[in-house]
Amino acid sequence: MAGTEQAISYDPYDVEIDTDPYPVWRRMRDEQPLYYNDHYDSFALSRFEDVQRGLIDWQTYRSGRSDILELIKADIEYPSCSRRSSRTRPAPSAASPVKRSSRTSRSSPVPATRPRRG
């Protein structure tokens, strides 16, 4: 890095950067593919190949809490949930098809016209 260049600073919440993020993303890919943000105490991968490897090996690279920074940093206990196999869900019965009542023949619950505001 040249002596006159500024250090990379990327704030994912900065609206100014979001108007044209490509220059900073390019610098991150070229200079710091594993970018550390001091302010948020978090890391970001900026190269496709690195992100892809992280997604494939998600058990190693997951935060274990969330993909939202505020939830990762929050001191919240999350309930454990067990994932069930799709085989444990009851299959819909072909013997009992849902019949549409004549009272529910309308396709949309929203009226076709709205009342005018006066």
Image (cartoon, helix red, strand yellow):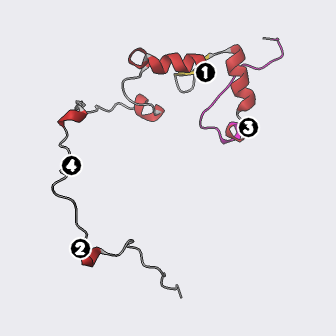
The residue pinned by badge 2 equals: 101
Eye-nearest disc, 4 or 3: 4
Element under disc 4: loop
| Rendered-image quadrant of the N terminus | top right
Does the magenta-highlighted stretch encompass residue 10? yes
Give the mark nearest the N terminus, 4 or 3. 3
Residue 20, disc: 3
Residue 93's place in the image compared with 42, above or below, is below
The rendered magenta stretch, by its main secondary structure, is classed as loop
Do labels 2 and 1 touch, CB within 8 Å? no
Query: What residue sits 69% from the left and 36% below the top?
Result: 17
Do labels 4 and 3 touch, CB within 8 Å? no
Left or right, 102 with respect to 106, comes to left
Give the mark nearest the N terminus, 3 or 1. 3
The residue pinned by badge 4 equals: 92
Residue 102's place in the image compared with 85, above or below, is below
The residue pinned by badge 1 equals: 48
Eye-nearest disc, 3 or 1: 1
- Of 37 and 59, nearer the camera is 59
Element under disc 2: loop
Tell me the magenta residue range.
2-17
Please tell me in which quadrant of the rendered image residue 102 appears. bottom left
> Disc 2 to disc 3, how far (Cα)?
54 Å
Element under disc 1: helix
**Percent x, y for residue 7?**
72, 19
Residue 37 visible, this orientation: no
- Label 1: few (<14), some or many (≥20) within 10 Å? few
Do labels 4 and 1 touch, CB within 8 Å? no
> Disc 4 to disc 3, how far (Cα)?
49 Å
Please tell me in which quadrant of the rendered image residue 32 appears. top right
